[in-house]
Amino acid sequence: MKLLVDVNDMYVNCHRAFDYSLIGQPVVVLSNNDGSIVASSKEAKALGLNRGFRYNRTENSGLELSLFLSQIIIHRSVSDSGSDTDLIQ
């Protein structure tokens, strides 16, 4: 049996699962193609960095946040495990 669950900001939570210091900090995950934000934490959203927004380092250089490129291997691994409920905040 398969279960489909929509996890809020899953890519961000995948990175937080491996680095607990990211919890409570603004985090964004960028696409590998064009630098668009594919996931952002609620802290990053509060700074106006929403999904689909193209992140430009020169315009946003004064912001304190963690940036990650989409890492499909990590994201798929966590998604496939399905039992890591600690990732859901």
Image (tube, grey):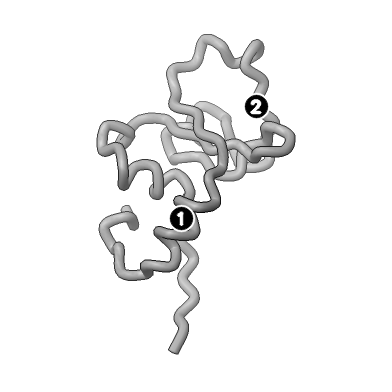
Q: Is residue 63 above or below residue 67?
A: above
Give how far across and how far down residue 80 sits, in percent.
43, 67
Q: Is residue 23 left or right of residue 58?
A: left
Q: Residue at x 46, y 55 (%)?
A: 8
Q: Residue at x 66, y 38 (%)?
A: 32
| Mark 1 secondary-structure assignment | loop
Give how far across and how far down residue 44 sits, in percent.
48, 32
Farthest residue toward the right? 34
Q: Is residue 9 above or below residue 50?
A: below
Q: Which residue is mark 2?
A: 55
Among numbered discs 1 and 2, the one appearing first in the sequence: 1
Q: Amino acid at mark 1?
A: Asn
Q: Is residue 85 left or right of residue 45?
A: left
Farthest residue toward the front? 73
Distance in Å between CA atoms under marks 1 and 2: 20 Å
Q: Which quadrant is the N terminus positioned in?
A: bottom left
Which of the labelled discs sits on residue 8, or is there none? 1
